[in-house]
Image (cartoon, helix red, strand yellow):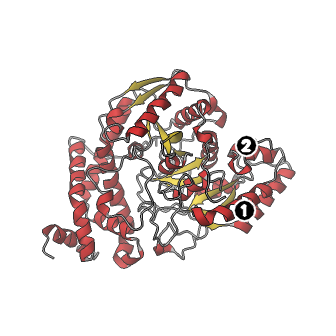
Amino acid sequence: MADPLEERIAAALSAQGVEASAGELEEMARAYPALQAWIGLADDLADGEPAFIAPLPDER
Amino acid sequence: LSVTHELHYASLIEIGAAMARREVSAVEVTRAQLERIELLNPALHAYWVVFGDQALADAARADAELASGRRRGPLHGVPIAFKDLYELGPTTAGSALLKDNVASREAAIVTSLREQGAVILGKLATHEFALSAATLNDAFPAARNPWNPDLTPGGSSTGAGTALAAGLAYGAFGSDTGGSVRIPAAHCAVVGLKPTFGLLSRTGIMPLAWSLDHAGPMARGAADATAMFLAAAGHDPSDPSSSRHTPGFAIEQIESGIRGVRFGVPRDFWEPRCDPEIKRVFELALEPLRALGATIVDVDLRVSLEQAIAIGYLIMLSEAAAHHAPEVRLRPELYGREFRLLMKLGLTIPARTYLAAQRARRVIAGRVGAVFGACDLLLMPTLGLLADPLPEGPRPVDKRISVQPAQVHTWLVNLYGGPAVSVPCGFSGSGLPIGLQVAGRPFDDLAVLTAARAFESATDWHLRRPQLRFR
């Protein structure tokens, strides 16, 4: 496995006891830039938000 | 029964009332439904399991009660069905992992509907664990869209959309994490309601994402969906997310009209990538609402489609991966490829990111709340795309996780937890259904259902039926 991104994904999964085939890692790596972009969107929106308390309407 | 159309397309309320008047029996109606399922289901695959004998026995009991003067409610004797995510007999969630699973309990909503006298016809097709899209080569047959059987009925409550559009049930219950009730409703020209989070129990419904999952009714009209919602609603102490709020209204109230109601159209959210044909149909759909006395104003939501889907997916993938991690570790080969890879990707999302997504969700909910100062309800196409062809095999995950995600306008409402309904509002030039989404403030389910019912009263889109090739 030469691709550093695939190696990082494999390591993250392996740390949780999950294996992935070479084909699976290649496919996941193709989705990773979009996933990283999504994480960036979350970070940008969350910036300045003090805390997560409850995400939903809750009158209790 | 004084119906001018076919029995199988009668409304749930109409058929229930006819039974109460003893003009038709529950056994006759149930038998007719079972015969139609036998005829059409081999081609449409709406149902994975049909409880034929049990349904007839339950119908006979409903008739006996009516004969003795007891009517439990508007659903008494009416045949309905449940997505195969609800625990009820054989329950697979569309996964080979559970192909031999028989539920040891019954979902709380199933029990509620039984107590209301409903007759349960069977279990309806679903995307695997309500997520990965069905394909033509799955372990379970993919439900077909009655408007064009080469296309998806929309998911993940696929079988519910198919069954209702084909006249194979009078109502159905699905589940909705990011749009899985409203999407098939839009693609199949039926009505789907995602109620306010907490109003319908989720006990006994297999989870996809705990903080986003909702149960939701589907039917061929807003009044029918309301009847199912009210029959199922109520606090459930066994569901930690169950609200102590009740819907707080009677079904007759949805007929009160929309004079003076202010609809906000958040064009910055949905318009940039919407299919132009759908946009044109949406603009035409505004006219009957104006004619009914409503005001329509553009509002600036300050949330993009990409933001809503990114935040929704980060939360959903994290929560779903946490739930499925043990089996992904031990028996990954039993999951379909798309679902398995999405779960593995979910396992790579750090806790810090999950919390950032939940914090971002609060920001989005706050922006939606601010817009509700300028309007009473939000209005937009349910989807900005038409139904896709059913794929031959699993889609690559970068089709799902993309910087240009599919034009699905439903995620927004799951993020803030309010009510939303999809109601038919027109057709494409190719004859495919288009849905109108009405979304409201949390616990204002009455307002969205009233708007949907008012729209129906001025249009006939919800009365159109597909020309089935299988008659």
Image height check: is B418 above or below B329?
above
Q: Nearer the viewer, residue A19 or B284?
A: B284
Q: Nearer the viewer, residue B302 or B87?
A: B302
Q: Residue at x 40, y 71 (%)?
A: B336
Query: Measured from the top left, where is residue B167 in percent x and y?
Result: 65, 53
Instruction: Give the number of the disc on residue B383.
Output: none
In this rendering, the count of numbered labels is 2
The chain holding disc 2 is: B
Q: Is residue B328 left or right of residue B117?
A: left
Which quadrant holds residue B60? bottom right
Instruction: Give the number of the disc on residue B14.
Output: 2
Does mark 1 fall on the same chain as mark 2? yes
Which quadrant holds residue B454? top right
Image height check: is B103 above or below B2?
below
Secondary structure category for the residue under label 1: helix
Residue behind mark 1: B35
Q: In which quadrant is the C terminus of chain B drawn?
A: bottom right
Query: Measured from the top left, where is residue B3 in percent x and y?
Result: 76, 42
Q: In which quadrant is the N terminus of chain B drawn?
A: top right
Query: Measured from the top left, where is residue B171 in percent x and y?
Result: 63, 51
Label 1 sits on what residue type?
A: Glu
Q: Is residue B65 left or right of residue B109?
A: right
Q: Is residue B27 left or right of residue B328?
A: right
Q: Residue at x 50, y 38 (%)?
A: B443
Image height check: is B310 above or below B88?
above
Q: Residue at x 36, y 66 (%)?
A: B338
Label 2 sits on what residue type?
A: Glu
| Measured Cα–Cα span from mark 2 to mark 1 | 20 Å
Sequence-wise first label, 2 or 1: 2
Q: Residue at x 33, y 48 (%)?
A: B309
The chain holding disc 1 is: B
